[in-house]
Amino acid sequence: MAESAAGTTITVQGEYSAWYPAERATVRASVHIDGADRDRVFTRAVESSDAVRNLIESIHDKAAGPITWWSSDSVRVWSERPWNNEGTQLRPVYHAALDLSAKFSEFDALTRWVESAVEIDGVTISSIGWSLTESTRTTATVEVRSRAVKDAVAKATVFAQSIGLGSVTATALADPGMLGDPSGGGGGGMHSEFARGSMDSMMVGGHGGSELQLKPEEIEVASAVDARFIAR
């Protein structure tokens, strides 16, 4: 706080965050085949990638879902010559791989798709990312920014009252660190979104079958704002 003839300057940072249930899930899958015969490795990779694409295309609908978007790479092929424990270089091992991504609007459909995909030769699920729709994200951003500003006003008011002053009037609002006070901002902008979720391990067995449990956690949308006030 700084005093002047016009009043006392109060600089604060307002913060607010809210949690929202995930609405979309982006799964990232990879196909990786290796072996001693280049042509055979390539053929198996193409067969597996085609099978994954068929799984995607069969339920892809941009508007209705459950897959609203997807993409895939071309098959990449390379080789390496490993060394054994005795220092002898062995015959080439060939690799073929590609990555695929798909966004789901229905999590039950995602679970079923993952269970089918991992049965395909060479397929692994790399990650699942959780997110909000653009509409929800926009609404949430407006809400948390407004609440962050209100939090700044409340803080400034408490500071003013604690030194016997009355009303506060805002003179500046900015993203953190943009008011020129090196001690008042952490950077990173006014809005941020954090997505948390997990994919429980899949239990596979010849007697009990397989069970996959996906557990999306809520997504935090947070905002911070630096504000400067004059208190009189």
Image (spheres, rainbow, N blue to C red):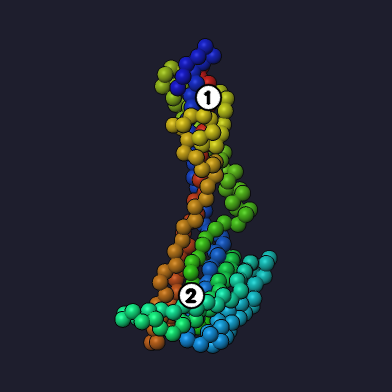
**Image position of 209 with respect to 227: above or below:** below
Q: Which residue is drawn at 60% across and 57% down?
A: 133
Tag shown at residue 124: 2
**Image position of 189 with respect to 6: above or below:** below
Judge by depth and name the residue closer to the eye, 39 or 47.
Answer: 39
Q: Residue at x 59, y 66 (%)?
A: 103
State left or right for residue 56 relative to residue 159.
Answer: right
The residue that disc 1 covers is 229
Where does the image place residue 136, in percent across and percent down from the top left?
60, 53
**Image position of 146 with respect to 11: above or below:** below
Identified by mark 1, the residue type is: Phe
Identified by mark 2, the residue type is: Thr
Judge by depth and name the residue closer to the eye, 181 or 64.
Answer: 181
Q: In terms of secondary structure, where does tag 1 sit?
A: strand
The reply to whether residue 133 is visible in this rendering is yes
Q: Residue at x 57, y 28 (%)?
A: 172
Please, which residue is most extreme toward the top here? Answer: 5
Mark 2 closeness class: few <14, some 14–19, many ≥20 residues within 10 Å? some
User: Which quadrant holds residue 90?
Assistant: bottom left
Where does the image place residue 112, in percent across and percent down from the top left?
53, 76
User: Which quadrant holds residue 63?
Assistant: bottom right
Q: In terms of secondary structure, where does tag 2 sit?
A: strand
Please, which residue is most extreme toward the front here? Answer: 88
Disc nearest the viewer among 1 and 2: 2
Q: Do the residues labelled 1 and 2 touch (CB within 8 Å)?
A: no
Which of the two labelled residues, at mark 1 and mark 2, occupies the earlier sequence position? 2
Where does the image place residue 25, in percent across and percent down from the top left?
54, 64
Q: In which quarter of the image is the N terminus?
A: top left
